[in-house]
Image: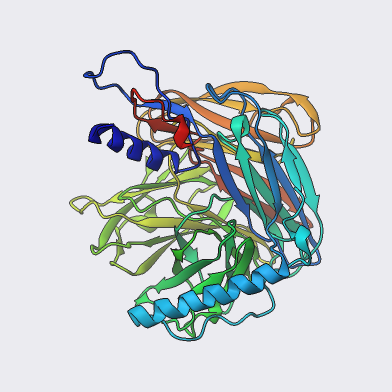
Amino acid sequence: MNRTTLSLIAAATALAAVTGFAAVTAPDTGDSTTAKAPARLPVERSSLLCPAPSTSELAETAYTSFTPAGTAGAGTGGAAELAPSVAPLDDVADDEKKTDDKAKDDKAQDDEAKDDAPKDDGSKEPAAEGADAKAKPFLALKEPGKPVSGTKNVADAPALVGTATGSLAPGWTTQQTTTITGGESRGLLGMTCTAPGTDFWFPGASTDKSRQDYVHLTNPDDTAAVADVALYGKEGTVKSDTGEGIPVPARSSVPVLLSTLTGEAEPNVTVHVSTRTGRVGAVVNVAEEKIGGDWLAASADPAPRAVLPGIPADATSVRLVAFAPGEDDAELKVQLAGESGTIVPSTAAEPLTVKSGMTASLDLGDVTKGEAGSVRIGPAEGAGETPVVAALRVVRGKGADQEVAFIPATGPVTERATVADNRAKGSTLSLTAPSSTGKVKVTASAGSAGGEQVVKTYTVKGGTTQAVTPPVPAGLKGSYALTVEPESGGPVYAARTLALARDGVPMFTVQTMPDDRGMVSVPATKEDLSVLK
């Protein structure tokens, strides 16, 4: 095997690792000199992590798991299961000791961290006892195209970890939706369970006294991970003695209260989670005094331009938070894409300056003015192409009847995107075409307890946002999934809003819909590489 072939193997392996494993066997046409375009093949394995939903006695949590049907080349068979991420007690103790030893070695080598790690405040989920703690599946998906649902109505519900294989892996998604009717975290808290990784950015978090923000770190693997949590405020790095070298034991989840990492109260901070060893899933849980709570998902990777779709038409307050992680400052033009076109809001008449390593914010007020929209940011005229991360804090309602949600920057739907747990009432699909007109196909799946799928197409005019009531499966019973696929034209960005009015409070949550990465590009090669799987 020559070096060229070896390079192709390395490229295939790296690409397949994005969401799982892809078959890498390509047909031999007998032509060894002509370069072939990479094949698009379905992933064969996907992983998801759902954080512990809540410690509130008033919490009711619904989970919906789904894989879209009809992925070409996915074959048949496979499994998709979510189970509690709780390790046996002895294993957790051993992992914590090994992780602490490793962290101490790292600190001694680079002199960057302190000797003390975050103290357990009692909020870490308890370890289960006995050898059966690699728990039985809580939610098991049987076939593509039909969602399954389950509920947990206990305050100590654990985090869930899961893996999908075979035909259930491409595009596998799980929605976690929690309703809390009282307390500081009151509201509708929704999130799309995340894939494990090593690097996450969360603009829009806070260490302010009015906020209780926890970053949940979930380790799906059988070996311990070590994570660093760095905070950046309006003046730059927020001093912290306990944010480095946080141990995350195997098959466990650790919530870290951001305000315990520093003595500085910052209303807007950017959180950077990275791992020294292993991988984790990361997401921020927000509880805001007198306003409610929700999950803050990670922003899309740093880029000079970003789209933040899905602002409800009746939003009463919108705040943009941005951060420039590189060495250069960013000058950003802030625009709103509404139903009739794109404008520069009066509150964003001047470019937003984002200093390198500092968090900047811009209050946009009731920017939508009764018309659903999406925020677009990019370099101001004459400014450089500086990568940024960004998120929106969105409020509906007034006075004591307010509710908050967060919208991170997201990527376009390049091949397919799916969001689960849609209801017969209360779901809104936002579609944004920031540049040129795009056409998408939207599939409403069968219901989790019955019903037949429905398909509808939408054409989104360039520079606009369409907020539509999505199609509902015929004879729907239970909840269902929405899948968006491009058909023609320019890029389209998508988000789903789930709303639930309770006692006069307009509870809601927004989930962005980036591409599901169910397909990977695999370079063509003459050799059968299936033995490498």
Residue 463 x/y as whole percent: 39, 35
Q: Is residue 353 left or right of residue 339?
A: left
Front residue (pair 212, 321): 212
The colour scheme of the drawn protein is rainbow
How many numbered callouts? Answer: 0
In this rendering, the answer to whether 498 lies above or below 54 is above
The residue at the point 32 percent across, 62 percent down is 324
As drawn, the residue found furthest toward the left would be 382
Front residue (pair 173, 445): 173
Residue 422 x/y as whole percent: 69, 39
Q: Is residue 81 left or right of residue 411?
A: right
As drawn, the residue found furthest toward the front would be 1
Q: Is residue 314 left or right of residue 139?
A: left
The residue at the point 31 percent across, 34 percent down is 8
Q: Is residue 76 left or right of residue 339?
A: right
In this rendering, the answer to whether 393 lies above or below 6 is below
Residue 313 in view in this figure: no
As drawn, the residue found furthest toward the top would be 30
In this rendering, the answer to whether 410 lies above or below 165 is below
Residue 358 x/y as whole percent: 34, 70
Residue 94 in view in this figure: yes
Q: Quadrant of the N terminus?
A: top left
Front residue (pair 305, 26): 26
In this rendering, the answer to whether 363 lies above or below 236 is above
Residue 365 x/y as whole percent: 49, 59
The residue at the point 34 percent across, 40 percent down is 10
